[in-house]
Image: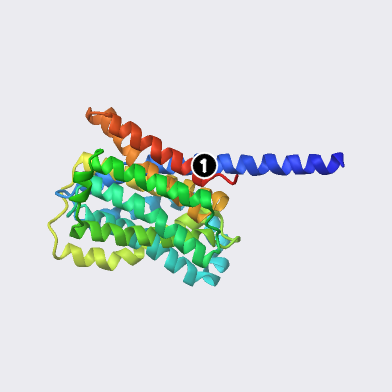
Amino acid sequence: MRLTQALLSQQYMNTKKELVIGISLAVLATIIWSGNFVVARGVIKQIPPVGLAFYRWATASLILLPFAWKRFRAEKDVLVQHKSYLFWTALTGVTLFNTFVYIAGHHSPAINLALIGTTSSPVFSIVLAAIFLKERINAWRVVGVLLCLAGILYLFSQGSWERLKTFHFSAGDGWILIGALCFAIYNIFVRRKPAGIHPLNFLFTVFSLGTLLLLPFYLIELSHAAPVQWSANLILIILYLGAGASMLAFLCWNMSIARLGAARTALFGNLIPLFSIIEAVWWLGEQFTMVHVFSGILVIAGVLIANLKK
């Protein structure tokens, strides 16, 4: 009897530990990603959208190359065996998702990119996870999603119902919605990652393949778009996108999905606008109001409630 209780206690502690690690990884990823929407809007006069995406993923692939090459060679048979899976994972999570975000940045303000992308992707993920992964949508998760949506909508409206009623979708909003759907599909694919592929090699393969899929569109853009206006600031931004928002953030996100599931992890994306506000206050000196406080409480409460089992 005591042995059984000890085993159950140990199993509970292991489960709790995995939950804490999964949540911590998801939060870290959202902190790193929080500047991506600002960048998408901030560099529209310096570099075209497909070019920005191409340089981002090429940089991330080159950074990962020396660390993942040995595993890539050792696991090449497994990679070939799952080539179709890797193609669709790279297409949705690398080639399409952020490219659509950067295209949207040429049409919509950063707040629309962050709010629409982060509120719609978790909803898409939950529905797709329920359909394809048979993940259960319990009452707590529904309440959590509704609270997250309420918090983001309150943030967007600044507490004014009249302002919310006048909101309308632009061409950029449509692009970011498609991007959010692509990222939700990517979450489903990550949940089904073959066990024989190491996480580091998985990222390297997906990033490299996604970059190759972007190449023809980048070459087409070169013949039509204005040339890139290179500067030290733009180089630093691409390094941030390649090393931080790509390699480190995606590694944390994928490890979180493995522990929490696609639907639960996707909910943490709602924290991105909140971290973006904190960054704006810290670096740009923008005003922090009670609207931000209240919306933040709603979103954080929604994320926590959605992860409760009892």
Q: Position of residue 255 (x, y in %)?
A: 53, 49
Query: Against 113, is 285 above or below?
Result: above
Left or right of 223? Residue 193 is: right
Q: Nearer the viewer, residue 21 or 65?
A: 21
Residue at x 46%, y 48% (from the top left corner) = 143
Q: Nearer the viewer, residue 84 or 28?
A: 28
Residue 124: image quadrant is bottom left
What is the crowding at mark 1: few (fewer than 14 residues within 10 Å), some, or many (at least 20)? many
Residue beneath label 1, please? 23
User: Looking at this rendering, what residue extends furthest in the front direction?
Assistant: 161
Q: Nearer the viewer, residue 12 or 103?
A: 12
Residue type at mark 1: give it. Ile
Determine the secondary structure under disc 1: helix
Quarter of the image with the N terminus in it: top right
Residue at x 26%, y 43% (from the top left corner) = 156
Q: Position of residue 54 (x, y in %)?
A: 29, 57
Quarter of the image with the C terminus in it: top right
Residue at x 65%, y 44% (from the top left corner) = 15
Q: Nearer the viewer, residue 310 or 60?
A: 310
Q: Position of residue 97 (x, y in %)?
A: 34, 58
Number of numbered discs present?
1
Q: Position of residue 273 (x, y in %)?
A: 32, 42
